[in-house]
Structure formats: C-alpha cells, structure tokens
Image (cartoon, rainbow, N blue to C red):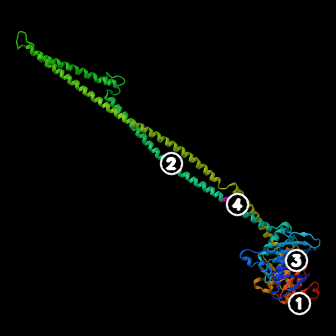
Amino acid sequence: MRIRELYLKNFGKFSEQHFYIQNGIQVIYGENEFGKSTLHAFIRAMFFGMERGRGRAAGKDAFSRFEPWENPNYYAGVMRFECGGRNFRLERSFDRISKHASLICEDDGEELSVEDGDLDMLLGGITPSEFDSTVSVGQLMARPGQELSETLKNYAANYYETGGGEIDLNGALSDLKERRREVERDLKAEQQKQEEKRRSLAQECIYLERDMEKLKSEFEEKRSAAEKAEKREAAEQDEERRIAEQARRKNGYVSGRNVPGRNASGRNAGKQAGDIPSRKNFLPGVICLLIGILGLLGAQFVPGPGLGSGSVVPLVVRILSVLVLLAGAVLLTAGLRRKSGNAAGAEERVSDTGEAEEREPRLEMYRKQREQLRWELTRIRAEWKEKKIRLENLREEEEEFLQSDREKSLLRRRAAILLAEEKIRSAAGKLGQQTSNFLNRRASEIFAELTEGKYRGIEADERLEIAVWDGERRVRAEQLSRGTLEQIYFSIRMAAAELLQEEPMPVILDDTFVFYDDKRLESALKWLRRQERQVIIFTCQRREGEMLHEDRTAKEGIDDHQ
C-alpha cells in the first residue's frame, strides 16, 4: 500500500493544503510548529476515522487537538492511495453535523462502503492499536505498548488454530466475555428473584410455626379445662348417687331388700306405710280417751246394788275408766309421735328433692361446657393438622426453590463460556510462545543489522520485557543507552509489522531518530531503503535528508520536501 496524496481541506492549522507522497523513503522536513504531527494525525484519521470524546476527556482528545483553527464546523480531508495495484480516493468529514466517509476506486469509478468494511479489507484488517504499535511511530513513542503484546497473542492463536488470520480469536474471547457478563447479569437477577421467593416462603413458614405453637398452647388449655369439667360432672353425679342411696336407705331399703308394706316404686309405698301406723294408734287412743272419760262420768251416776253409795261397782267402773283413759292417752301419744316422725321424713324427702332440683341445672351446665370444650378440641386438632400439611408443602416448595430450572440452565451456560475462555487462553498462551520465538528471531536480525553486529539477539517475553545478547552475556534493557533502546523498539515494531500485516502499510516515523547518533541513523536508513514499504519520515533535523542524498544509489524515487 502506498499513499499518493494528502489533501487537508480543513484540519488543524492546515486549510486547502496538498501534499504529494513519493514511493520509497519520503522525508518531510519542518521546524517546530511546522505541522508534522498534524500530518501524521491526519493520515491516521483518514485510515481509521476520528471520534470526539465525552466528558472531561473531550478537551484533550485528538478530535479537539486537531480541530481546524478556522471554521471548526468544516472539518474534512481527502487521501488518495494505491492498494493491490488499484487507485482509490478516500474522503472524510469529521464534524458531527456533516460527518461522512466515501471510498471510490478511481480506476473504474466503483463506489465502496466504508461502513460495510470495504476499507478495512483494503487495509488488511489492521486495527488502530496495531497501526500505532507497529508502523506508526509518534514522537518519543517508539516503545511498543501492551496492545502489541495482546495483538501478537491473538495473532498466534488465530494462525496456529485456524491456519491464518480469518478468525479473530481475541475478538471471540471478547465476545465470550460479553456473553458471560450477560449470563451473569441474568443469573444474578434470577437468583435475586429466587431469593425473594425463598424469603417469602421462609417468612410464611415462620408464621405457620407460630400459629401452630399458639394452637398447641390453646389445645393444652382446652384439654385441661375439659378434664376439669368432666371431673366436676363426675363429682356431681357421684354426689347425686350418694344422696339417692341415703334416701333409699331412709325409706326402708336395707341392703337392697324391700320391707313389708312397700311397693316397687318405693315412694308411694313409703307414704302408705308411714300413714297406716299413725291411724292405728291415733284413732284407738281417741276412742279410749272418750270411753275413759265417759266411764268416769258414768261411775258418778251408777249406784251399787244394795250397797248404797259406797258400793264397789262405781269404784270398779272408775278404775276401768282410768285404765282405759290411760291406754287412750298412751295410744294417742304414740300416734302423735309416729305422725311427727312421718312429717319429719316427708320434710327430709322434700329437702332431698329440692337439692336434686338445684343439682340438675349444674349437671346440665357441666355437660354443655364439656361438649363445648370437646368441640373446641376437635376444631383445634383439625386446624393444627391443616397448618401442618401447609407447612410441609411449603418446606418442599422451599427446597425446590434452591435452584430453579432457569438458574440451573444459566449456571450451565456460564460454565460452558468459562470453559471456552479457558481453552482459548490456553491455546493463545501455548501458541503465543511460537510467535514470540519468530518475533525474537526476526527482531534480532533487524537489530543486529542496525548495530552492525554488536548485538546478536533480542529476547522479548509476552509482556515485552526485553533483554539483549552480545555474544558473551545477557544484558537487561534498563542497562542499555536510550539510543540502543530506541533501536530495539524499532526492530520489534518492524518485525511485528512483517508478522501481522498482510498488506504492507507505509511506515510513518515522526522524529523517531532523535536519540540515534549518525552511525546508527545511517544503519537504520540503509535497512529502510531495502524494504518494499513506503516510508514517510517527519523530522525537524536535516541529517536524514542529507544522508539519503549523499547516497547516489538511493536518489531515485526520493523527493526531499523542505
């Protein structure tokens, strides 16, 4: 690939400026503030575009740094270049209002699409970071960055896994990381959802356990009350039976046998048996009293036959009347006593009947209380059993919520992605060593030529930690001079460019040889002259141009712009 023309319509300090670039080595000389770095930035912006940063970074980014000095709203340029034997015209507008890019093949007028990747294809798939780490060397920026290390790892994995660079394994790794982040976000959301459900179930279980404890306490209280009610009812029934037994004994029942004159019912027979003796005693007594009184009265008027007033008959009548009177008095007294006894027994029976009538409501109350308590106990048992079944179901449901099917699926997906990432890293790490060996070998060849054989080899690990070999000892990079370090960095960049770029890009050097002495500069220019790449050197010193002009064999194709 070769750049033919740079047309800065309005870019930085330049407005409507044309720069025509020759093949081979092109030296663009200019004093400080000439705009060499602006031209370098313009080439990069035409290849890869330029976006304005956001926030605080926007004031220091390349977009703001190279914004046109005059009419900032018109921010554009054109590049004409040759690639694959065809000529192209690339035009870009960088301002946000009229931002666009167009690519046209000047040979046949075909319009290509920058947005669809046609320009990337012409550039061989090189990325801005690869461009900055290889062929584009800024002021005091010769040391390759970590981006080159990552690019080399990716290239190694791509090449040895696929036989070429068609598949971007580093991009695949980035895609896997993004997918893993998405899966982890979904997994986190699902786990939070499951955790909320688990907390809800656990809380409901706690409430059920508390309710069951309350029911258990209530059950114990009701059972105790029921036992007490049953005991009170049994005591009342025992008392009723005791009193009834006493009443039966008082009414003539002795050891379970009836006395004469009592019928089966007991109450009427007792009543009749109590009335008959009183009548037998009371009535004869009254009769005897009447007879006795009449006898005494009659004795006063009955004269004895032939005996006169002093007859014995009246005396005998009086004596008999007195005896009959006494007998009547005795019978009357016995009848009265028996009746009094019957009355007392009746009163006692009435008293027993009253107590029985008072006891009956209490027994009924105890029975109702006992039935109510038994119903409460049955209700509590049923409610407790229902809550127990609900609690067991919730426990089972809580165990099922430990991992949902979606959560299990997300965990499997994440595990698969992590395994894929591990495999890619492992492959890139192993195969990267082979690429590192190739890079060290080619960089060593370039470095040995630049130092005219003083150093024979370069050793750079995957982090681009560098040491050199002078044939006798291994020297760490920090022990070398700045000029030697610049040669090492230049050698690594050029070796990486040969390794990574399918389409050889122009080498752009912006005051790269500041720390080179004349001998080292001459060696570097000789090496560059033998390369097939186009080389553009921006410098504030005249010695690069002078050295090239002094070598007559290199005058063809060299145009010194001063």
| Region of the chain picked out in magenta, as a range | 185-191
Assign the C terminus to one quadrant of the image.
bottom right
- Res. 321 image quadrant: top left
User: Circle 3: is it few (<14), some (14-19), or many (20+) Cα within 10 Å?
Assistant: many
> Mark 3: which amino acid?
Met
> Mark 2: which amino acid?
Lys
Nearest to N terminus: mark 3 or mark 4: 3
- Secondary structure of the residue carrying tag 2 is helix
Q: Are marks 4 and 2 in contact (CB under 8 Å)?
A: no
Q: Label 3 belongs to which residue?
A: 79
Nearest to N terminus: mark 1 or mark 4: 4
Measured Cα–Cα span from mark 3 to mark 2: 91 Å
Dot label at residue 186: 4
Q: Are marks 1 and 2 in contact (CB under 8 Å)?
A: no
> Mark 1: which amino acid?
Glu
Q: Label 1 belongs to which residue?
A: 546
Nearest to N terminus: mark 3 or mark 2: 3
